[in-house]
Image: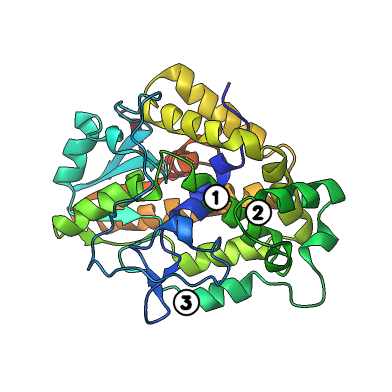
Amino acid sequence: MMTKTKMLLSSVTLVALLAACGNNDEGQTNVNADPANNITNENTNVTTEENDNDLTTEDPDEVSAEEVDYSGDGGYFYRTANGDTTVYMLGTIHVGHEDFYPLAPEIEDAFEASDVVLPEIDLSSVEQDDAAFMNMGMFEDDTTLQDVLSEDAYEELVTIVESQGLSSEMINQFQPWIIESMLLEILMMDSELSAFEGVDMHFLQRALDDEKEIRELESVEEQFAMMSSFSMETQVQTLEEMIETFDEQSSGLDELALAWINGNDEEYRNEMIDTLEESFDNVDEEYRTAINDERNIDMANSIDEILQEDSGQTYFVIVGAAHFLLDPSIPSELEDKGYEVEELY
């Protein structure tokens, strides 16, 4: 059984954004910044080298996988259509490894045939004000992180951040959801997996190279607003679970990657679903409603509008795999609207 890790949920939102949180010289998001150098930098200001629209970068700390076989075909791949319009939908993982690619021929062929790519967020054109992002995550009164976390959780968190050369004073001003994203960055620094090799980033880069139209289904502002809107109780629940399981999270990342790249295997698929379901057990219902249910309904509605337009084009959707696995899912919502959704892989 895969490690029960909040990463499986947070990767749906935060990990995709971590790769877009570094600052360029103008103070706006640079999609080429290394996600490992963002909030964990005490000044929250990182200088990165411009690289046009290239979404990929070389991580100097990257270590080639020797123990984990990341090769496979990928999974969670669907198709639906209306008239002359076809929509392919790939449930992705927002971190990845170069050995993922190429994916199954059915997936590769569908991308090549597509006219328009529909990601959750178009990271190739993100212009998020980093200062606004950080301010969004700060306490507005005299409350501190230490005030809202349990004593044991706070002490463990301090141990983690001090091992990275950070101080408790630096983290104490931020709300739990920001600190959760910081812990994700710390995990990514020690992982063979990278947001820059994530499936979303991989296909976005190819879409840029092939000059395909890119049309996002959500926005970075919407996702940040969602994460910051959770009640303090929910934020504390998710952060404390991550702190409690932090030592297991690195292996959980590998298990997540293996579950995705082998997603056409029923055993891996069932483990992924079970782990995602279990990840909601100790969290208030508002978390699942916002992270999964409402977003799936909204994205299915957007896909429905595209299908109803019947432009005759072929579309390639790339959103987190959880949006296809947990009901109400994108496929179940489309089926409720009367579409036939075929699982291809």
| Whether residue 285 can be seen here | no
SS label for mark 2? helix
Q: Which residue is mark 2?
A: 161
Q: Residues within 10 Å of mark 1 (few under 14, many from 20)?
A: many
Position of the N terminus, as image quadrant, is: top right
Which circle marks residue 129 in the picture?
3
Describe residue 307's horizontal placement relative to residue 2 as left or right.
left
SS label for mark 1? helix
Residue 128 drawn at (x, y percent): 44, 73
**Circles 3 and 2: CB atoms closer than 8 Å:** no
Tell me how far mark 2 sits from mark 1, CA to CA.
9 Å
Which circle marks residue 186 in the picture?
1
Residue depth check, mark 3 versus mark 2: number of the one nearer the observer:
2
Say which of 212 and 301 sits in front: 212
Q: Residues within 10 Å of mark 2 (few under 14, many from 20)?
A: some
The structure residue drawn at horizontal position 62% and vertical position 33%, both measured from the top left corner, is 248
Tell me how far mark 3 sits from mark 2, CA to CA.
25 Å
Q: Earlier in the sequence, mark 3 or mark 2?
A: 3
Going by the numbered disc 2, the residue's amino acid type is Val
